[in-house]
Amino acid sequence: MATLWNKGISCTAEVEKFTVGKDRELDLRLARYDVMGSLAHIKMLNRVGLLSDDELKVLTGGLEDILGRIDRGEFVIEDNVEDIHSQVELLLTGSLGEVGKKIHAGRSRNDQVLTDIKLFLKDEILLVRKEVLQLFGVLQGLSDTYCDVMLPGYTHFQIAMPSSFGLWFGAYAESLVNDMYVLKGAYDVVNRNPLGSAAGYGNSFPLDREYTTELLGFASPDYNSAAAQLSRGKAELCTAAALGSIALTLNKLASDCCIYMCPNFRFISFPDSLTTGSSIMPHKKNPDVWEIMRGECNCIMSVYNQIALLCGNLPHGYHRDSQLLKDILFPALEKMHSCLGMAAYMLENVQVNKDILSDGLYDNMFTVEEVNRRVLQGTPFREAYRQVGIEVNSGNFHYGNGSGSTIKPSDLGHTHCGSIGNLCNDRIAQLMENAFKV
């Protein structure tokens, strides 16, 4: 196998297979970023006098040719090549000769893969941000559209108090704001440049790490070379935490949708084309999309623990265990993109039941409203509570004109910010706008 570290003695085929694992397959996602890092690195080498202008021109042309192959989908990591870094360097030396070997001066595969991953994660986080904003917009639009449609609120899975579809959709929109704060934190951790830290202890070349930081669009270098290596695992862990936070929001939304679609509830429905059927029961409309999403999000939430356990008890410096981070995090990112896109797609087609409260089953959810009404008329709270409780137990409780189907949020006097009568969606939108600015 072609490796950058070969000194004339090769590993056995068994050792190569075990240690390389899925690296070639996963490294294809890093190909563009590896070339970008190399382009910045050779510009810096030229700036500090380690490459001539002619060498820089030749190497830049060679790397841009490889970048073209990547963009056209023609780039592969050959079976006898260990990883993306080896493949790029071998292509350069194959086409340019000895000058191709000069791109590795002043760096190690350790800082090279760190740079690739951080550039990759920056783009992935920004893509997740875009997808979250799309879903946020859908949820806020639904909240505004159905702000006056009543919905039973539940605690302990028991009918509790009046809610609305505006409050329900809006709650998940604001939950995404909190998730966006976490995502921004992950981006800030990722957005630092490890290039030039080499194997974790720097080197004796007069590297200009501030210059590569500027070229690659990082906010700052990882200044301490050993700290740069410590960021391997930390960047992935913070990204996993952000994905897990979003996944928790989607998981709860999916669970709600599974319940609300149930014929016993009939709160929402979806077109037949967005549900699935049963092989034996012809009447079924199954919430398979939401069930799969719920399961996928549970898997995403487990990624943080997997990374924490993988990286725990490792002393500072590079260890090959870190290679497995890609096996854990990369699939989770794909799941996250898929779930966010599908959630927005499904909700764009949601059908809301506007007549839920015509069922007398929900009359008792107005007990708190009645207690409060009596308190405002001068009855002590405990006495009003007792009176309403007796009426409920005897089957004689009625609120208003006795029909909840005609009640709207505006009839209930819920005026404080964030209540069903004052959703504050404009303020929530402003929070989201401020949550993650690049």
Image (cartoon, grey):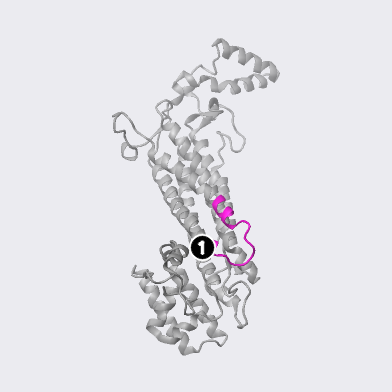
Q: Position of residue 175 (x, y in %)?
A: 55, 44
Q: Position of residue 394 (x, y in %)?
A: 56, 10
Relative to 319, is 386 on the left or the right?
Answer: right
Does 426 appear in magenta?
Answer: no
Relative vertical location of residue 421 with respect to residue 102 in this rendering, above or below = above
Foreground residue among 388 and 415 = 388
User: How many labels were placed on the picture?
Assistant: 1
Does 315 appear in magenta?
Answer: yes
Residue at 56 percent across and 50 percent down: it is 305
Q: Position of residue 195 (x, y in %)?
A: 56, 73
Residue at 59 percent across and 59 percent down: it is 234
Viewport quadrant of the C terminus: bottom right
Residue 296 in sight from this viewpoint: yes
Relative vertical location of residue 213 with respect to residue 378 in this rendering, above or below = below
Q: In the figure, residue 21 lies in which quadrant?
A: bottom left
Residue bounds of the magenta highlight: 305-323
Secondary structure state at the residue bearing disc 1: helix
Foreground residue among 184 and 282 = 282
Residue 434 in sight from this viewpoint: no
Relative vertical location of residue 226 with respect to residue 292 in this rendering, above or below = below
Disc 1 designates what residue?
A: 323
Q: Position of residue 131 (x, y in %)?
A: 46, 52
Residue type at mark 1? Answer: Gln
